[in-house]
Amino acid sequence: MTTKLDQDDLNNAVWAACDTFRGAVDATRYKDLILAVLFWKYLSDHAEWQRKDLAQRYGPDDPRVERQMKRARFVLPEGTDFKTIHAKRLADNLGELINKALEKIELENEAKLKDVFRPIDFNSETLLGATKERNRLLKLLLEDFAKPSLALTPDKVSEDAIGEAYIYLISRFASDGGKKAGEYYTPRKISEIVARLADPKPGMTICDPACGSGALLIRAGEAAKSDDHRLFGQEVNGSTHALARMNMFLHGEDNALIEWCNTLTSPALIEDDRLMQFDRVIANPPFSLDKWGADVAETDPYKRFKPVIPPKSRGDYAFILHMLAIAKRGEGRVVCIAPHGVLFRGAAEGRIREDLVRRNLLDAVIGLPAQLFPSTGIPVCLLVFDRAREEGGARANVKDVVFVDASREFVPGKRQNALGDEQVEHIVATVMGRHTEDKYSSIVTFAEMEANGFNLNIPRYVDTYEPEPEIDVAALQKDIDRLETELVETRRRIKLHLAELGIDG
């Protein structure tokens, strides 16, 4: 019986395959190549295993083998599999050979794989250098993925494990990638919190309009605890959009629809000339995005940015307003990661914030610890909105908001802090149960928020002040008197010792 490769071993094997590029190419640039090869290797190994399985069942020359291979989940045209290209790894045009193989696979599976490989260029001189160096790096990369430890056949590794290895790679690239990493990855524990606060149910549609590489959307699908759900996403960066598509397939989310577009200026999830509506909307949008599209917001055909247009230099509320616009009226739930500035900044953002609170859409505000993201050291917050609180909704009678200050509960790290299971459970239980806890959470009425001018800065509502311990002045004076007495005696002894030594003290 074949022993399955466990998750840690697989993670270590795929990370070791990145050694080819480390030091030669920046992680934020070579990640697309590594992840594309992992997906290609997965497709190739599965196709080879399926062909062998069918040949054993029917016989190698039985026409049923070819018929079933052509009806497989993914069809690989002849000569495009990883093993064939690996055999040509000494070719002078290796990058071109890889590009052509992936292009053929994409065309053969256009309904599923359109634009998945196209944005990723294995023949890029800008990325990989001149021909000789490029061929050397690609040859080493193919040899790394050809090792037995990366045999991705169903009898050796589960599809779930491959999907998790893919996300593991993304997380490692994000850790190494610094500020740019925030564009495509949300740390796992934060993703879990967002997914659980969104509270998806079987049969629901879930959308992430700034989906990056899709990890947050995957976690939301898992939180539904059923295969009966559908995922939707939008991503503006072409190569990141491709990574998200691969991520969906590796997690069995073949029906996920991930569009390549600018969510704020030209959303692509449209139905009958209207924005598609979803049961759950989640996102970790880029923080305070400059030039987000304020110049065209006034004429937005979907009227998302009414009655107040967010400031042109900060797109935080533009994303929030879009998310609310695509959440089903009277029932949709929204969870957004944002910088703390959205809670207290004034002017246009203050007016938007007031409007959202007055419309009874805000359900919870959670402050997270600092240094949780590879892209920023600042603490961030989670905003939970619930359109079921609107008039006629199932929760229209709920008028208060849960405020949570979780900023002091984390697992410290050298470069980056993290959340553990205990912190995740504490946050989720507090919000979903609407609990109050001294120095951690409170339930805040509309009147309180109105009295504060709709400033939602968490310390206004959750008192985390720790009083200084009381000082016993009488005991302190006794200690001082004792020390002064001891000092006088010490000085007397020193003077005697100096006199014995004939030194004038």
Image (cartoon, rainbow, N blue to C red):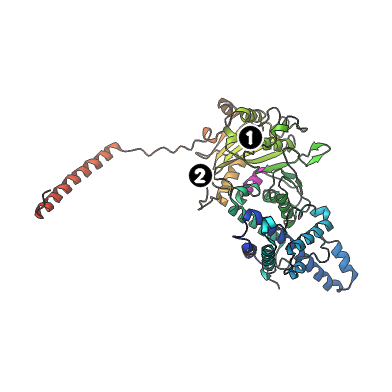
Q: Position of residue 47 (x, y in %)?
A: 79, 65
The residue identified by callout 1 is 313
- The amino acid marked with disc number 2 is Arg
Is 84 above or below relative to 449? below
In the drawing, what numbered circle is on residue 198? none
Circle 2 SS class: loop
Between 480 and 353, which is closer to the camera in this rendering?
353
Total labels drawn: 2
Between 295 and 270, which is closer to the camera in this rendering?
295
- Tell me the quarter of the picture where residue 280 sits: top right
Q: Nearer the viewer, mark 1 or mark 2?
A: 1
In the drawing, what numbered circle is on residue 408? 2
Between 344 and 334, which is closer to the camera in this rendering?
344
Write the start and end of the magenta stretch as one range.
191-198
Residue 55 in view: yes
Residue 192 in view: no
Q: Position of residue 148 (x, y in %)?
A: 68, 70
Please rate how many residues cluster around mark 2, counting C-alpha atoms within 10 Å: few if below 14, some from 14 to 19, many from 20. few
Q: Position of residue 34 (x, y in %)?
A: 68, 59
